[in-house]
Amino acid sequence: MATLQSILIHISFGGYLLAVIFYLWHLVRAQDLLRRTAFGLVLLAFCVQTLCLAWRWLVAGYLPVTNLFATQFFFSWALAATYLYFELRYRIHAAGLFVMFCNLLLLGSALPRDPAIPALIPALDTPLFTLHVSLSFFGYAFFAMAFSMGVLYLVQKRLQTALLPDLGQLRKLNEEAVFLGFSLFTLCMIFGSIWAYVAWGYYFSWNIKGVWSALVWLFYAGMCHAKFVRRWQGTGYAVLSIAGFGLVLFTYLGIGLLMSSNHPLD
Amino acid sequence: MKPAFPESRVWKFFCSLKLAILLASAAVLLSIGGSLLMPFNPELFGSLDSMPLDQWLATVAGQAPALTWWLPVAGGLVVLLGLNTLCCFIDWLCHFRARWRKIGESLIHIGFVLILGAYLWGSQAGFRNPNVPMLVGQNKSLPKLDLVLRLEDFEPVLSASGRPMDMRNRLALFRNGELLERVEIRTNHPLTWQGLVVLPTSFGQTIRAGRPVYYSILTINYDPGANLAFAGSLAMGAGVLLTLVSFYRKRARGDRPEVG
C-alpha cells in the first residue's frame, strides 16, 4: 500500500510539473492546444492527489495533517484546488502559474520525506483540529493566489502584454482571493480558538504562532477595508497582497521550522 | 446648523474606514517588530499564557520595560480599533433601513468587538492555575468563585507500550456543600462552569501508605468573558457565511466595490 501511495504522489507531481511546462510553452507560443493540455494535466494530477489524500484519510481515520510531509501534501492539494477554482471560474490560464510553482515546490520538497502516517495524539483527536487546519491551509492557498495576482498586476502595468489578463480583471481576482482567504482564515481562527479553550483552557495563546496568526488576520482584515479606499486600489492593493503573503510564509514556515512554537512542523 | 449625531463630522471620523486601516496597520507593524523579541526572551514572554494579561503586565512586563513596552501599546491600538469598529456597528444600526444588506459585515464587526471585550474582561477578572496536582479524594478550594472542586477518581490511559495516551478524571464541583456538577474530563473534554474551565494537563506517581498511587495534574482557569467570546465567535462565523453569500450575489450582478 505504501508503494501505491508513493506512485500516486509521484504521478500527481509529474502531472503538475508537465502542466507548468505546458503553461510556460503556452506563454511563448499562444496555442489553445497547449493551454488545454496544461489544464487537463492539472485536473488529472489533482484527481490523483485527491484520491491519495482520501486514501490516507481513510487509512488513518483522521485527516493526516500532523507533520511536515502531511501539511505540505495538504497545502499543495489546497493550492491546486484554489487554482482550479479560479481557472474554471475566470479562465486565468497561465496567470495562476505562481500558485502552480508553489504547488510544485511544496510537493517536490515533500517527496523525499517519509509519507508514513503517525499515530494521532489525543489532543489532536477532535473535529475542531481538522476544521482548524484545513481552513487554515485553504486560507493560505487563497493568499498565495492573491500574491500571484498582485505580482502579475505590477508586471501587466509595466508590460501591457496580451498574454496576461487586463488590469481590471487582475484587480478583481486579487480582491476575490483576499476576501475568500480572509473568510476561510477567520473561520480557521474561530475553530482554533474554541479548540484551544477546550484543550488548554484559554482561547488566545501568546505563543509566537498565535500572535502571528492574529497579525495575519488583522493584516487581511485591513486589506478587506483598503479596497474601498481609492489610494489603495490597484497598485497599492497589489503591493499589500505581496507583503501579506510574506507574513503568511513566515507564519507557516518561518515560525514552524525556525522557532519553538505550539504548532511544530516536524 | 450642526448636523445631528449620526451625520456629524466627529462621529464620521470615529466610524471611518481610514481610521480603521490606520489603527490596524500601526498595530500590525508594531507587533511584527515586538513579537520577534518573544522567542529570544522566554524568561519574560514565556509566562504570558500561564497568567491573565493584566497580571503579566503588572508583575512581569515591568521587569524589562524596554523589551515589553510594545505589547501594551499594540494592545491599546487594537482596543482603539475595537472602539472604531463598535462606532461603525452603531452607525450601521442608525442607518439599518438603508444598509441592512451589510448584515454579514456588521456581524463580523460586532463579533470582533465582543471577542475583544471578552478578552479584556477575562484579562482583568480571571485567573489561571496551570499545574494543580490532586490526589483522588482531595478537594481544591476556589475562594474567588466560592466553589470547591473534588477529584473523585483518576485513571491514566496507557498504550500497550506504556505510553500515556489520555487522562480520565471524575470531578465534582460544589458550592456550600451542594453538588453543582459531576463530570468525567479527559483531553479535549474539560469541565466548564460559568467561565471556570478544568482540564487534565499531566499526571505523576507518589507513595501513599507504602504503595504507589497516581495523582492528576489539572489546569484550573477562570475567564468570566469566555461565554461572551463564544457569542462573539458565533456572530463572526455567521457574519463570514452571510458575507460570502452576499459577495457571490454581488459578483453575479457585476457590482464593483464603491470608491471611498
Image (spheres, coloured by chain):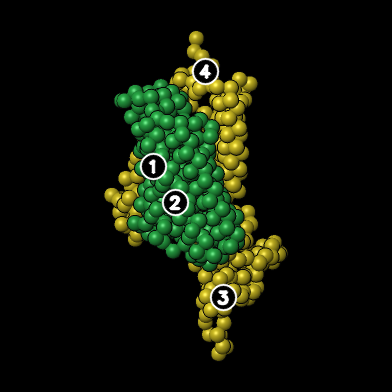
Chain colours: A green, B yellow
Which residue is labeled 4 in the image? B7
| Secondary structure found at label 3 | loop
Which residue is labeled 2 in the image? A13
Q: Position of residue A165 (x, y in %)?
A: 42, 27
- Look at 61% across and 70% down and name the residue there: B168
Q: Residue type at mark 3?
A: Ser
Which residue is labeled 3 in the image? B159
Choose the circle earlier in sequence order: 4 or 3: 4
Is B193 or B29 nearer to us in this picture? B29
What separation in Å lies between label 2 and label 3 (alpha carbons)? 37 Å
Is B69 or A129 nearer to us in this picture? A129
| Secondary structure found at label 4 | helix
- Kindly indicate whether the residue at mark 3 contacts the one at mark 2 (C-beta within 8 angstroms): no
**Residue under mark 3: which chain is it in?**
B
- Look at 49% across and 13% down and name the residue there: B2
Q: Nearer the viewer, mark 4 or mark 3?
A: 3
Q: Nearer the viewer, mark 4 or mark 2?
A: 2
Is B197 or A163 nearer to us in this picture? A163
Q: Is residue B188 visible?
A: no
Which residue is labeled 1 in the image? A21
**Residue under mark 2: which chain is it in?**
A
Q: Residue type at mark 2?
A: Phe
Q: Residues within 10 Å of mark 2 (few under 14, many from 20)?
A: many
**Residue under mark 4: which chain is it in?**
B
